[in-house]
Image: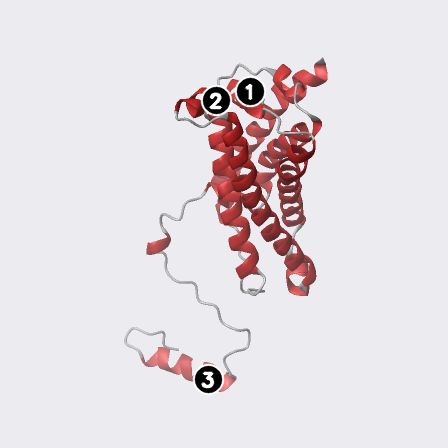
Amino acid sequence: MLASIFWGAVYPYLCLAVLLVGCLYRYAYRPLSWTSRSSQILESRWLKWGSPLFHWGILAVLAGHVLGLLVPVGMWQAVGITPALYHQGADLIGGLAGFVAWVGLDLLLLRRGIHPRLRRTSSLSDWVALGWLWLVVTSGDAITLWYNHTAGPFPYRHTVGPWFRSLFLLKPDPGLLGQLPWPFQVHLLLAFGLFAVTPFSRLVHLWSAPVAYPRRAPIQYRRRGALRPDAATAAASDLHRQPGGTRG
């Protein structure tokens, strides 16, 4: 009984509290660390495939979750979408989106492990964030592509959906979580755990919008030792000859 209350009513709010407080603290006191820490300069061939696959796939997955969990069943039926039609669409579109996100995430993980420069510059938080993401995506794909086709489609909109809405209304109903098959419980607990991991990793860029990007000055990258000593001396001389330049 206590375990059911903890996992169904306490644990979600605990994870969300860590997410909120951790992100606010990091943004206020460590603003320069609020970044995705792009590694494109270290390796781009794998990144150009893995990153778009993962991001577009996960965006489609999140859109499906919002429509499936937050929109009541009655609203779907009001527009003529029966439960059978809904589950067929969820299996087809959701399964494809989840598989695309999983392939992209696998490429990103392999990329970080195979390339020596990436491996040396990867922190513990990078591996934890990517690994936790992999568990969340894999458990979700297992439900869509395996469980629903072996045990039959579970009517999660009558259990997971009301449970989510009870959390948002601050009236959690932990009994609904206990009615779920274990694959759904594992997936949900991993997903909420990802919220708690976010403030300590590069996943914080999820909450940023590139509003100031068009006005930002371009970042210049120079190869180490690119300027020869004579070229560097000539550049310094040009600076001294400019009006207002520094003079020795």
Task: Measure how far apart labels 3 and 2 are at the Cα level.
Answer: 70 Å
Task: Measure how far apart labels 1 and 3 are at the Cα level.
Answer: 71 Å
Q: Amino acid at mark 2?
A: Val
Q: Amino acid at mark 1?
A: His
Residue most toward the bottom? 230
What is the x, y in percent for residue 55?
51, 49
> In the rendered structure, which disc, 1 or 3, sits on the residue that comes first in sequence?
1
What is the x, y in percent for residue 237?
39, 82
Q: How is the image coloured?
A: secondary structure
Circle 1 SS class: helix
What is the x, y in percent for residue 75?
42, 22
Q: How many marks?
A: 3
Q: Which residue is mark 2?
A: 73
Task: Measure how far apart labels 1 and 2 are at the Cα level.
Answer: 8 Å
248, above or below 77, in the image: below
Q: Residue at x 68, y 31 (%)?
A: 183
Q: Which residue is mark 3?
A: 231
Residues 238 and 51: in front is: 51
Q: Which residue is mark 1?
A: 158
**Tag 1 near tag 2, CB within 8 Å:** yes
Circle 2 SS class: helix
181, above or below 60, in the image: above
Q: Give the position of the C terminus as an image quadrant.
A: bottom left
